[in-house]
Image (cartoon, rainbow, N blue to C red):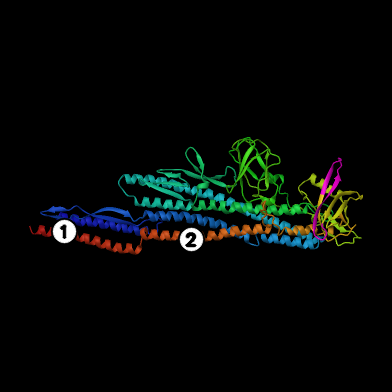
Amino acid sequence: MASLINIGMSGLNASQGALATVGNNIANANTSGYSRQQIVQGTAASQQVGGVFIGTGTTLADVRRVYNAYLDAQLQTTTSLNGDAQAYLDQIGSVDKLLSDSSTGVSAALSSFFTALQTSAAAPGNTSSRQLLLTSAQTLSNRFNSISSQLNQQNEGINSQLDTLTSLVNQHTATLASLNKQIAQATTAGNTPNDLLDARNETVRSLNELVGVTVQEHDNVYDVTLGTGQSLVQGSTSNTISAVPGKVDKSQFTIQINYPQSTSDVTSVISGGKIGGLLRYREDVLAPAMNDLGRTAMVVADAINTQLGQGLDANGEFGSSLFNNINSAQAISQRSLASSSNNVNSGNLDVSITDSGALTTYDYQVTFSSDNDYTVKRSDGTSMGSFKLDQKPAAVIDGFTMTLNGGDLSKGDTFKVSPTRNGASAIGVQMTDSSQLAFAAPLVASVGSSNTGTGAVSTPSLSAALDIYGGAALGLKQSQIESAMPVRIAFDEAVNGTQGYRVLNEKGDEIGTGTIVPGQGNKVTINVPVTNADGTTTQIAFDTTFSGSPGKGDSFDIKFNKDAKADNTNANLLLDLQTKATVGVTAGGGGVSMTGAYTQLVSSVGGKASQAKVDATANTAALSYAKEVRNSVSQVNLDEEASNLVKFQQYYTASSQIIKAAQETFTTLINSL
């Protein structure tokens, strides 16, 4: 009865294997990435006895894991997408609140500034209201500075996270390479290392949480790539990635892959995982928001300074800047960043703002094809054209110009130009004396006391705006304007629907003539010659509007404003800036106000934040479903395993009974002899 004993022993062995497998499943029920295992039994070869074949028991053919490659691939993909979405959402939420909250955003501070300006305009001679305006300007400036600082801190935080995450990626890729080697060795020996296979899949899943990767399997080995095929793991070898300061913009870390003999920047091709989400957020939200905020701050400073420069302050002097000069030496030198790969003797570019209203929120790549020729491409991919560095005047591109700041330039040199990036951090209040706020118009008009007609005249304004940043040239221009006054416009009799006038200087000499159409508004430009110290003549031009019908001999006097302290003409023009389109103005018009520009920024970030919440929720649901489907196949079911445990215990007991029966039969046989 040896064959019966063997049959019983084979059953014992099989049931022991089954019990061990069930026990292993139960023990690993909470092990991440574990796939439940099943035994595979086979029938042992039968033996021929006479004319029949009798079975000889069972064999334990294999222990296989319950695994579906397609479901695992779905889990890997959704893990990558969810990691990306969650990282993006984590970043944008804080910025959305920062920009939109009344206690931290710019809207309330900008509104308070114009409210203070309105109060000052109503009482231009009131010292307290003037001082309140200076305080409001400082609050507005501080708010821009604070937001800019927090955005820069977030950028630094992203750099730190990228550095940490790339280190984790390298740990996972090294683990994958090691697992590939172990699995290859085990399968070569004809084994199926289930636990190693599970560990490898779980490592890939963990890797996808960090960065989106693609896996190709061949000969039981995983090759792992990212982006457009850059190799992270190939067989038993792995490459590392690093977060390093950018070649051009060192404040923004880039991702490079490190090969044995070279490195390659893969920032632009990475997607998925936390790293992909951080990079996507930085490009989609953070950098544009910094540029947008900077542009608004620059327009606020420049537009208000420029308008102040057109008026007179409480001391009867031409206006001074309220805010810092947007074209300070420091500002123009910081708007261009030279690539670290440029020629060692290459200089940098000075970027000056010529029209703050025409500025965009883009960055620009400047590439030199020679020491003088260069092309400009906007960050949205738009080519701005080809230019020469030495052309006069310098080419104006979206409201700015570029000149060489020392050194030489060579073919292949590249620069990143960010005209508005530092605008919000650079804005500051320059004025300390509120009496220097230029609320008055420099010129005033009066009606002749003996006039007989119905003619009226508007407050004159200079035809060409004064450049408040003009330095000595501005001072000369201001003195010329004062010297040009007063002038008198004397009207002749109306003839055939038109009426002539003469322009007389202080001595009564005629210096110009013109005509109007009586009975309607007539905007005219008056040119007044001024003789300079060197004998040359400068024309001072101003605009004014005549309405009504002046009588013959009626006159209107234009004078330099001697009572500037009580005049609010320029203050009202400053108030107009609250609603005037001053931001993003194109050649065809358009543009929005300062308040409108900031509102658009808040709306843009808010819209992206709302979409990020939707995306994160959807990806979380997709990941949950992928896990559920995968687990329905591969996860340990404790109820099922408990049932199997009872079944295989019975199997073991029954097999032992076979052996017992064989022994009893054998004993009976021996005793019968």
Dot 1 alpha-carbon crowd within 10 angstroms: few under 14, some 14 to 19, many 20 or more:
many
Q: Which quadrant, please, contains the C terminus?
A: bottom left
Q: Is residue 520 magenta?
A: yes
Q: Going 76% across and 62% down the picture, which residue do you hit? A: 118
Comes first in the chain, label 1 or label 2: 2
Dot 2 alpha-carbon crowd within 10 angstroms: few under 14, some 14 to 19, many 20 or more:
some
Name the residue type under label 2.
Ala
List x then y, in percent, for residue 654: 22, 62
- Judge by depth and name the residue closer to the eye, 607 or 660: 607
Q: Is residue 102 magenta?
A: no
List x then y, in percent, for residue 98: 62, 59
Q: Secondary structure at mark 2?
A: helix
Name the residue type under label 1.
Ala
Measured in 3D between alpha carbons, the distance from the residue under mark 1 to the one under mark 2, in whole angstroms, is 64 Å
Residue on which disc 1 sits: 662
> Viewed as shown, does residue 164 lie left or right of 1?
right
> Viewed as shown, does residue 547 lie left or right of 628?
right
Does 445 appear above or below 363?
below
> Viewed as shown, does residue 537 lie left or right of 380?
right
- Judge by depth and name the residue closer to the eye, 588 or 444: 588
> Viewed as shown, does residue 673 lie left or right of 239?
left
List x then y, in percent, for residue 130: 79, 59
Q: Going 45% across and 55% down the picture, which residue do you hit? A: 79
Stretch of the chain drawn in magenta: 517-540
- Judge by depth and name the residue closer to the eye, 104 or 365: 365
- Judge by depth and name the residue closer to the eye, 363 or 108: 363
Residue on which disc 2 sits: 618
